[in-house]
Image (cartoon, rainbow, N blue to C red):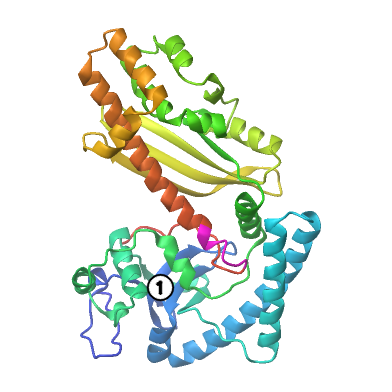
Amino acid sequence: MLFMAGQGAGADKPVPAAELAVDVISVKGGPRLLGAVLGREENGQLAVAVRREWLAQTHPQLYDASQRDTLVQCEAALQTLRGRIADWRKARPAEGELAAFLKQEADRVEQDLQRLQAGRYQEPAPFLLLDFPQSRAERVVVQTAARRAVALAAWQVPLERVETRTAASLTQELKQRQLAPVTDPDELLLMLPVRPESESAWVARRALVEYQLRKPFDLQGTGDLVFPVGEQAAGAQAGRLIEGVVKNLTGGGLQGLLDQALDPSARPQAAGGGAGGEKWLASASQAAAAADVSGFRVTRVDQNLEAQQVSVETRFVVRFSDGAWRTVWSHTEKGDTTKVRGDLEQQIQQDPQVRQVLEIVKAVGLGGDEQVKLALRFGAATMDCQKQADNRFFRFRDRYLQSLDGPVFPMAPPAKAK
């Protein structure tokens, strides 16, 4: 059966779901919703984000009920948050920047609660969050990541009638405005109203705030080898960018010479035992526990000579109440080493430690200039990916530092489009 989108403002012709940029959710005994499927919440409910204006025009009764429910949910969330902040302040008294932030948030939450109780609170979020049992979803069409990126960009502008126009039409208008699709799906979280937050999500939020305002803790490495990034390690980073390539070229035979050229204190330490394919997590979590932090960022590099590709994966890992350390956010950037990155290659080549490594490569006759160029290309590609991964992490971090009732932590990704 062809799944058709309903008509909205502007009398659009019905558009097949396969041509839309938005997700389509048909509810048993209820409306057909056009928006974004966020996934399943911890209680198993299916969560769907729907633009407030579209819902008010298309399903006014559902909008009124959702608006009332949103205010109830908001008050419940703020009541819980008030207690959580009080407990946090007791656990971390006189913590400088963190203490100032918590006091500011405690005062703001109290003011918002007073406005709610007086009927003067205005929810600014452009989207409403609807949730219902998975069994009530008669048909769910989740668009591809590319189409969802178009919808998100269109909502951010905002363009008109995003829900009822084809993805091609929205893409064309974005191009005319010289705007690109938004590839980070978590940007949608910034447009959702305040909601109650589960204990596990609160633990993750608290760890991220403390990472920024109390004590940041970062690790870097390759494969199962990770090491804390301190001042000494940061100084050796440029050399480490090309060390992996040199090791692959020589089969590890130059390791002793490389250790003399690079700061040994920055050398990654082999991880102990670990679950599955994440052996690095054991040593990383031990280092984080020793540093007295509840969350850390880890960045791992993979350099594939045969495929001429590098990838940089960065994660934020949190310790939960059961003592286990789990990833709450991750992102991977991939780079083609055949791409010319002249400025970055020059920047790497001018580093004193890099020059020592390259002199070693030349001295032992590993192919001369060609191998040096190869090492520099891999180093530049890695640095480029590292920069992009950093930017993605900073966006993730910053969206949770504006307020403690800001967007909930990302849920599991929805199923693939059918």
Frontmost residue, 260 versus 164: 260
Q: Which quadrant would residue 205 be assigned to in this image?
A: bottom right
| Residue drawn 46% across the image and 10% down it | 256
| Residue drawn 30% across the image and 30% down it | 378
Image: magenta residue range: 398-404
Report which residue position mark 1 lands on. Answer: 138
Residue 228 seen in render: no
Q: Could you tell me residue 162's position as x and y percent? A: 30, 78
Frontmost residue, 217 versus 65: 217
The secondary structure making up most of the magenta span is loop
Q: Quadrant of the N terminus?
A: bottom left
Q: Which quadrant would residue 230 be assigned to in this image?
A: top right
Q: Is residue 145 left or right of residue 124?
A: left
| Residue drawn 71% across the image and 49% down it | 321
Q: Give above or below for 154 relative to 362.
A: below
Q: Give above or below for 257 relative to 383.
A: above
Q: Is residue 402 shown in magenta?
A: yes
Q: Could you tell me residue 49's position as x and y percent? A: 45, 73
